[in-house]
Amino acid sequence: MKLYYPLIFSAITIGLGTILLLNRVPIIITLGSVLDITLLLISSYFIYKNIKYSSLFGLIISVLQILGNSTDPTHLRALSEFGTTLYLSTLDVLMILSFYAFPLLYILLFSLQKLNKKEKI
């Protein structure tokens, strides 16, 4: 799997969540999501083009996604409501994919890539 795929998948799932939350959250949250999507896609493109340090930037974004989401009381409260309605469950699944699964996959792929490069030396 290409290193930039998890970042693209994360951007897509954040985009879907943002669409589902339009007019239900403050505009600043929507703008933050758009900024996050933009950073993920730019980082993906730079990794695709083998721009120096772009994979490290992707790692930083992935770690920040996990830390930011796991310490946010609003997201934690939303997770505790999983299963109450189809709408909330859909948002929770998107949140888990966007902010946990895909960032963790990126960290794993990044680590494996660095280990493989180290072994080739």
Image (spheres, helix red, strand yellow):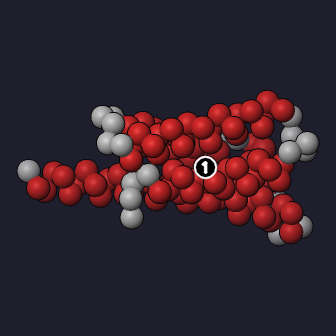
Residue placed under numbered mark 1 in the picture: 11
Residue 84 seen in the current view: no
Residue at x 78% of width, y 37% of height? 30
Residue at x 8% of width, y 50% of height? 121
Residue at x 76% of width, y 47% of height? 18
* Crowding at mark 1 (Cα within 10 Å: few <14, some 14-19, many 20+): many
| Residue 89, image x, y percentages | 80, 65
**Residue furthest top in the image:** 28
Q: Is residue 39 above or below residue 96?
A: above
Q: Quadrant of residue 39?
A: top right
Amino acid of disc 1: Ala
Q: Quadrant of residue 72?
A: top right
- Mark 1, secondary structure of its residue: helix
Residue 26 seen in the current view: yes
Q: Is residue 105 left or right of residue 120?
A: right
| Residue 16, image x, y percentages | 73, 55
**Residue furthest left in the image:** 121
Front-most of residues 12 and 69:
12
| Residue 68, image x, y percentages | 62, 40
Residue at x 79% of width, y 30% of height? 28
Q: Is residue 14 left or right of residue 103?
A: right
